[in-house]
Image: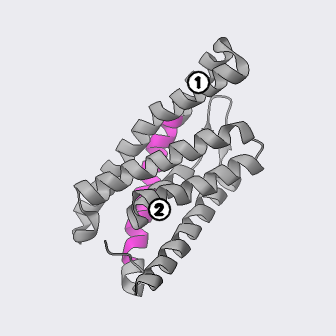
Amino acid sequence: MERNLSVLKLTQGGIIAVLAFVSFQFFRISTPVATIHFGNSFVIIGALLLGGFYGGVAGAVGLTISDVLSGYMSDAPATFICKVLIGLIAGVIAHQIFKINQTNDKKKIVMIATVSSAVALFVNIFSDTLIRWLMNILMYGFDSAKVLAIKNLLGSSINLVLGTIVAVIFYIVIRPALKKSGLFIEK
């Protein structure tokens, strides 16, 4: 049974990585102010389904590969760190604090998923901006880093709202389907 659980986690983690990759690679909206994407939603969904570490790493792998293949190679290290952090925070809130897998109350599940997502993505606004600001100082100098930090704050704020909405909707649709099929990982 333990081996089957490992295979199931690995498979679901791979699917999360692919969905994060595809959502950024093909469904992002680039504006002069921000890049809007739903990749963070899949990091959150991964954290809600697999736990913070596995979900965070799965989403981080997908988004980091997407950065590399999209020409954002210099962003890849920050992306990986920040996405794992999103997963860890969402996972701790959902699983350790609220015990999301121990309830079947739909309203409570929506509340837990929303709080987990919003808090993790709120922390991401500042951690992502700080990490990228420090990297940009080294690469481009202080003045350019300031402008890029403001742009990053705006983009991350928009992605917080959209990412939370998409993550919660997808999770409340996916969870019952996985439970019905016997593929839901109970913790």
Q: Position of residue 130 (x, y in %)?
A: 52, 27
Q: Is residue 45 left or right of residue 11?
A: left
Q: Amino acid at mark 2?
A: Tyr
Q: Position of residue 88 (x, y in %)?
A: 41, 51
Circle number at residue 134: 1
Quadrant location of the C terminus in the rendered image: bottom left
Residue 105 at x, y = what percent? 21, 68
- Establish if 59 lies above or below 28: below
In the displayed structure image, the side of residue 119 where residue 144 appears, left or right: right
Using the numbered discs, state the Cα–Cα distance from disc 1 to disc 2 in whole angstroms.
27 Å
Which residue: 41% across, 66% down? 49
Residue 83 in magenta stretch: no
Tell me what residue is drawn at x 26 percent, y 67 percent. Answer: 106
Dot 1 amino acid type: Leu
**Secondary structure state at the residue bearing disc 2:** helix
> Do we see residue 86 in this rendering?
yes
Q: Residues within 10 Å of mark 1 (few under 14, many from 20)?
A: some
Q: Contact (CB < 8 A) between labels 1 and 2?
A: no
Residue 151 visible in the picture: no
| Residue pictured at 40% horizontal, 87% vertical | 1
Helix, strand, or loop for circle 1?
Answer: helix
Mark carried by residue 112? none
Residue under label 2: 54
**Where residue 56 sits: x, y (%)?**
48, 55
As drawn, the residue found furthest toward the top would be 143
User: Taken as a whole, is the magenta stretch helix, strand or loop?
Assistant: helix
Q: How many marks?
A: 2
Instruction: Write down the region rendered in magenta.
Output: 156-177
**Image: 146 above or below 169:** above
Quarter of the view holding residue 143? top right
Using the image as rendered, state which of residue 37 and residue 20 is in the foreground.
20
Residue 31 image-quadrant placement? top right
